[in-house]
Image (cartoon, helix red, strand yellow):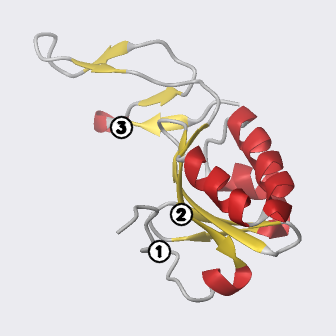
Amino acid sequence: MGCTLPLRFGLHLARSCPPVRVGLDPVVTRMVTCYDVNMQVIARRTLREFWARYPHAEGPIRAWVAIAAKARWANPAEIKRQFGSTVDFVGDNRVIFDLGGNKYRLVVHVSFSFGRLLVKFIGTHAEYDRIDPETVSWRKK
C-alpha cells in the first residue's frame, strides 16, 4: 500500500520506510522521512460553513471526509480507483470531486508525499462553473 518516493541519486524509498541517511559522501548526509499515515483533510471549517448554507450537502460532505481521512492515497490512480467517474484531475495536483449526485463540487490540492488534502473550493455545480479549478483558492479576500 506504500508509494515510492524518488530521491536524489536515483534512490527510492517505500512510503512506510523509517528515516534513513541518503548521500554519496559519508560526511555529507541528509535525513529523509517517509510518512505512512492516513490523509489529513485541511480546512474542514470551509466544509462546515458550506453545509451550514446548504444543509442537504452535509451528508455527502461528511461521507467524503470519512473516506478521505481513512485513505492512504499514493498517487492519482488510487483516487480514481476509489471514486471512479466522480473524480477529475487538473494541474497543480488538484482533484475535483463530484458530491451529492453531481450537485456539489469539491476542489482539493493533494500532497501525496505528506498525506494532506487542502480544500481549495466547495460549491454548487453552478458556482463551480464560474471558477477556474486550477487557480481557485479557499482564502477569503
- Tell me the kind of residue under disc 2: Arg
Asked if disc 1 and disc 2 are in contact, CB closer than 8 Å, the reply is yes
Crowding at label 3, few (<14), some or many (≥20) Cα neighbours within 10 Å?
few
Q: Position of residue 105 (x, y in %)?
A: 70, 70
Q: Nearer the viewer, residue 54 or 44?
A: 54
Q: Nearer the viewer, residue 71 or 100?
A: 100
The residue identified by callout 2 is: 94
Which callout, 1 or 3, points at the residue further toward the start of the chain?
Answer: 3
Residue 102: image location, x then y, percent: 82, 75
Q: Which residue is mark 1?
A: 134
Query: Distance of mark 1 from mark 2, alpha carbons?
Result: 7 Å
Q: Which mark is residue 64?
A: none
Q: For this view, does 18 lie left or right of residue 20?
A: right
Residue at the image position 71 percent from the left and 31 percent from the top:
1
Instruction: Count the labels in the image.
Output: 3
Looking at the image, which is closer to me, 93 or 47? 47
Tell me which numbered mark, 1 or 2, is placed earlier along the sequence.
Answer: 2
State which quadrant residue 88 falls in: bottom right
